[in-house]
Image (tube, rainbow, N blue to C red):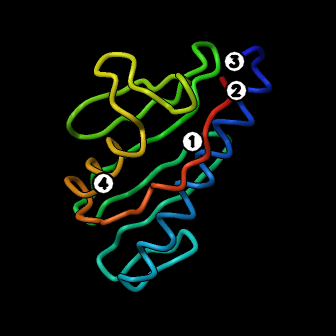
Amino acid sequence: MTSDSTFMAAADATLAAIGAALDAALASRGGANGMAADDGTDWNLNEGILEIECADGSKLIVNRHVPNREIWVAARSGGFHFRADAGVWRDARSGGELAAQLTGLLREQAGLEVDLTRLPSPPA
């Protein structure tokens, strides 16, 4: 990506899309619009930081990291750094895609099935 502003716009669009997908998943469990589901799962997005609180009290954090132009994910199982690569957010270490990895992390840690197939593509 050529500039911080381009990265921030792409990352913010991705975070918003994750939030919308969380809303859809929570609506099927009794909560939506960032509100807690019946089991206590909740999320909020503030200034580039998406915080997902799981029913067991653990958290998943997804945030934009402007200096490295990456989206970072912190989960109980570890930390992941995703860079724009050929139209997808790809993990810098494993090469896995953000949508697939985050779907698995949400299933594992929150017991939540989230459809992330419509995440926007970052610019090349």
- Mark linked to residue 59: none
Disc with the residue nearer the chain's start (3 vs 4): 3
- Mark 1 against mark 3, which lies toward the viewer? 3
| Cα–Cα span, label 3 and label 4 | 28 Å
Q: Which residue is denoted by mark 3 in the rendering?
A: 1
Q: Which residue is denoted by mark 2 in the rendering?
A: 7
- Mark 2 against mark 3, which lies toward the viewer? 3
* Residue 124 sits above or below residue 25 on the image: above
- Mark 3 against mark 4, which lies toward the viewer? 3
Kind of residue indicated by mark 2: Phe
Disc with the residue nearer the chain's start (1 vs 3): 3
Is disc 4 surrounded by few (<14), some (14 to 19) or many (20+) residues within 10 Å?
some
Residue 44 placement: quadrant = bottom right
User: In the structure shown, which secondary structural element does the residue marked by tag 2 occupy?
Assistant: helix
Q: Which residue is denoted by mark 1 in the rendering?
A: 49
Q: Residue at x 57, y 13 (%)?
A: 68
Task: Tally the marks.
Answer: 4
Q: Residue at x 20, y 36 (%)?
A: 77
Residue at the limit of the structure toward the bottom, as seen here:
30
Q: Position of residue 92 (x, y in %)?
A: 39, 17
| Cα–Cα span, label 2 and label 1 | 14 Å
- Mark linked to residue 106: 4
Quadrant in which the C terminus is drawn: top right
* Residue 17 sits above or below residue 68 on the image: below
Disc with the residue nearer the chain's start (2 vs 3): 3
Q: Position of residue 115 (x, y in %)?
A: 41, 62
